[in-house]
Image (spheres, coloured by chain):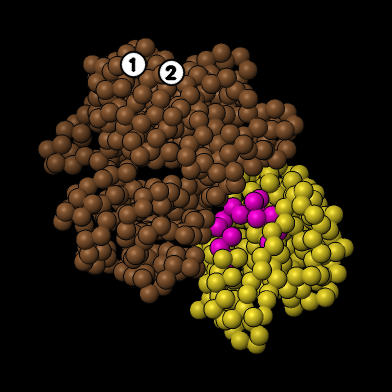
Amino acid sequence: MKELKILYLYPDILELYGDYGNIQVLKYRLEKRGFKAIITPYTIGDKTPNFKDFDIVFAGGGADQEQSILAKDLIKYKDNIKEAIENKVFFLLICGAYQLFGRYYKDVDGNIIDGLDIFPYYTEAINDRKKRCIGNIIIDVTLNGNKTKVIGFENHGGQTFDIDTPFGEVLFGNGNKFGDKNEGFFLENVIATYLHRTSSF
Amino acid sequence: MRNFFIILIMKILHLILKICGKNGGNFLGKIAYKWNPNIFKYFKVNSPVIAVTATNGKTMTNNAIGYVLKTAGKKVLSNQEGNNMETGILSTILKHCTLTGKIKADFLVFEVDEGYIPVIFKDFPLNTLVVLDFFRDQLDRNGEVETLILKINEFLKTYKNNLILNADDPNVARLGKANPDNKNVYYFSVEKYKYASIEQKEAGEGKFCPFCKTKLEYDYYQYSHIGKFKCPNCGYGNNEIYKLATDVNLNNRTFKIDDITYKIRFNSIYNIYNLTAVIACCNLYNIDTKIIKEALSKFVLNNGRLEEVKINDVPTIINLAKNPTGSNVSLRILNEDDEEKELLFVLNDNLADGLDVSWIWDINFDNLNNVTRIITSGTRAYDIAIRIKTSGFDSNKIEPYLNLSEAVENLYKTNTKKYIIANYTALQPTRKELKL
């Protein structure tokens, strides 16, 4: 049976929004298609993973405090990750992970958390804990030449700027910023999005 | 003078509602609070005020404390039905106070929504605060758990009265350090129980030390992130325990505190924690242990908190679960039961439930023990059905019905034991369908 190796980053930290569900669905659907999913978790303190060895790298979202702690850990692997992306390893990044792969994240108190700086976008939280993009969201996405609608739920205070290649066009909801036309980031083998609990239809 | 008239009008409204056979929920409180948001300052309280807050367990613990006190012959004013925001508590008070705002009771016992502790008790007296746990819940309403904890921590910085905290929840125990001058901090804990594990089995919070940010180490997890933890760096977690529950036996439904065995009506580890908190609280008010023991042997809630009934002679256990931990604890009980069973899961996404149902992916449906069929219902019947299917449960044995009547009808086509899990707005409609 063909195997697909999935690297699951910080499963114990980046799992605030049921994002572990993505791994569960991946595994389930791969198995239905005759693939064996081998999921390798990595968290702070584990042996350095070789990102190039994997087919898919997945990371979800977490609470602000936890994210700032792991950002310092993930930055150590920046070159390893860049190389993996160049080698066409597929990256699926949700919410917090999406933000971390950019230049920086400025939290609600104004503190700057350095990102991995792999992509040029950056995220800034609005200076008001109560102002967040929260709600169901529907976007139009083109995958493998086919246009499809993707539905999910967004909950983020961070507003992401400087996206040249968005994941989808917002039909209902906010997207990268309040009232944005665009959602997420999509460049060849990297999908980064604020959508939790996505389904396509 | 203004407050006098507000209360007068509320009393009249209350009477009208009563005549119409309506309860009113937090209706009275809503109006009164709108007219005067400072109205809490007006009331004259001459008895201890006890408040219970948590993500899970508020209603049960609030009702249990009230029940014990009533068994001890005390007059108790409480928001038993669970309206726990400022308007709900205000409604409860308005229904029972005099026109001059005097409240006549031996004890006031309230369950309070986590976000409203600072709101209510900045103007209203508080003598004992019981904090049970903090889990992720309704992230779209509450933001993060950390935000809630910080709000309560801020309030506690100047609080000097009784504070009863769960020593086994790192999110709760930290509140003991909010005011170093408070000498009235009491911790409760439960000894390792039969199904405790070395690894965390369910999603949880509190992974990092709130003081020095080092990853916390656990000797064991009782459930979710509740367990024996310690910070290997600064030593956080080492607290003197006021009440420790030992010899937990969920088959016999017994546990021990201070050499006294309590027999209770529940068989879940998370209830052991709740009732230990109840005992800690009642001890502080010198309630006779014999009375506590007697009351707890009888205490049961008939509103979907581990409710055990017979429908058409079929044993049915109903539990409310509003978030992953509540659901996981319900499934724990289901899995600790070896008998053949069927499960009904009713999931709504109304405003009060939280519009987002991502949290169902944090429920652990793996390896269900002897479950032969699963029925799903509620507005998001299909979401929960897919989630369960993804865990590997045979999809031929999953039946989704958007219509709750149909779901219940189909559920009782067999005589197999039933477990029913419903979330907040799904619970009462489900109980109604069951004719409870």
Q: Are marks 1 and 2 in contact (CB under 8 Å)?
A: yes
- Chain B as rendered: colour: brown
Q: Residues within 10 Å of mark 2 (few under 14, many from 20)?
A: few
Q: Amino acid at mark 2?
A: Asp
Chain for numbered disc 2: B
- Dot 2 falls on a residue whose secondary structure is loop
Which region is colored magenta?
A8-22
Q: Is residue B219 above or below residue B368?
A: above
Q: Give the foreground label among 1 and 2.
A: 2
Q: Amino acid at mark 1?
A: Thr
- Observer-nearest residue: B107 or B141? B107
Q: Is residue B29 above or below residue A153?
A: above
A61 with respect to A50 (left or right):
left
Q: Is residue A141 above or below residue B250?
A: below
Q: Residue B216 placed where, x, y %?
A: 67, 38
Q: At 49% across and 16% down in the image, what residue appears?
A: B161
- Residue A119 sits in which quadrant? bottom right
Q: At 61% across and 54% down in the image, what residue appears?
A: A15
Residue A11 magenta-drawn? yes
- Residue B77 sits in which quadrant? top left
Q: Which residue is mark 1?
A: B289
- Chain A as rendered: colour: yellow
- Residue B174 sits in which quadrant? top right
Q: Residues within 10 Å of mark 1 (few under 14, many from 20)?
A: few
B99 with respect to B347 (left or right):
left
Secondary structure predominantly adopted by residues drawn in magenta: loop
Q: At 32% across and 54% down in the image, what residue appears?
A: B339
- Dot 1 falls on a residue whose secondary structure is helix
Q: Which residue is mark 2?
A: B258
Which quarter of the figure is the N terminus of chain B placed in? top left
Question: Looking at the rendered structure, which numbered label has been put on residue B323?
Answer: none
- Observer-nearest residue: B377 or B414? B414
